[in-house]
Image (spheres, rainbow, N blue to C red):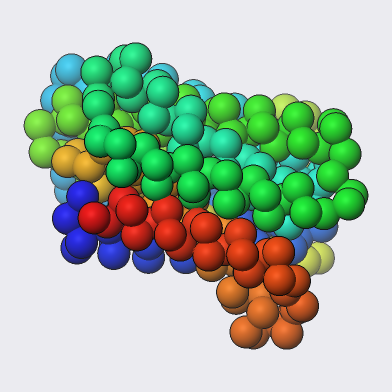
Amino acid sequence: MLSYTGGLVLIAAVLHASWNAMLHGNRDRFLSMTWMSIAIAVVSTIVIVFLPMPASAAWPCIVASGLVHIVYNVSLVRSYRRGDLAQAYPIARGSSPLLVTLGAALFAHEAIGPLHAFGIVMISGGIISLALQSSHVSRAGALAAFLTGVTIAVYTVIDGIGVRLSEGNALAYTAWMFMFYWLMPLLFMATRGLSALWTPIRTAPMSIGSSLAGGLVSIGAYGIVIWAMQSGAMGAVSALRETSVVFAVLIGRVFLREAVSVKRWLACMVVAAGAICLGL
């Protein structure tokens, strides 16, 4: 993977950690995810007006990925209900690179070298160890987070294949896939009603504002990843993206003055070493 591409994916990792923190920080995460989705869908609706249509071969992947993303959104909300961010996030994100690598090999006939494979294993192992160091990891919470990781792997492989079929129109592919996020407010209103969606604009404007901001951040975060998968190995791109977990630890230590144990620092070093392997 080119160093320029890898650097952009690392930026995407920082953005990804940021919007997940915004989501977890809100009390009503289903509501927050819905408003994030509205922001994403609105931007996508505007953008597609100015872009060419993706190649016809990419449309099955656009539809499939869009639907899987909705399942992912709901699964992520459920996993955050069952576990803390420090537990659910690393398990979900750490399990996906290995699954993406397997899926890319099976469905895209993608092969990677031993060094990159070793890097992916190091990143996944280091990230998951961050979660397992907690003494409060429940079986239900771990399972919910792992299932979220499965949905991440599924849509990542679909998008990796789809963007390569889009004939270089990564932005158009991403925008049309994100159009499916209009399904989130429909799902929310079907379960809670219209007033539950609109009333918080008046009663909790700061929460809605942070959700909208999180949606905008997530567009950049995953848009970079889809662009990178045009030429980069899916598993390697996925693994670099999941270093967002380490950035979350560093942000917590530097800006929030959170304590970080020696074991957590060692796990972060393992992840960093894995990232270096991917860059070689």
Reply above or below: 86 against 189. below
Q: Quadrant of the C terminus?
A: bottom left
Q: Where is residue 262 drawn, in percent x and y?
A: 71, 71
Q: Where is residue 215 drawn, in percent x and y?
A: 51, 56
Whether residue 251 can be seen here: yes
Q: Front-most of 151 and 91?
A: 91
- Left or right for 125, reference 276: right
Q: Where is residue 140 drawn, in percent x and y?
A: 85, 31
Q: Residue at x 39, y 56 (%)?
A: 275
Q: How many marks?
A: 0
Question: Looking at the rendering, which quadrant does residue 93 occupy?
Answer: top right
- Left or right for 50, reference 262: left
Question: Looking at the rendering, which quadrant does residue 273 occupy?
Answer: bottom left
Reply above or below: 200 against 104. below
Q: Residue at x 46, y 62 (%)?
A: 272
Q: Residue at x 11, y 38 (%)?
A: 168
Reply above or below: 156 against 273. above
Q: Where is residue 271 drawn, in percent x and y?
A: 50, 57
- Left or right for 199, reference 118: right
Q: Residue at x 20, y 61 (%)?
A: 3
Question: Looking at the rendering, which quadrant does residue 8 occupy?
Answer: bottom left
Whether residue 209 can be seen here: no
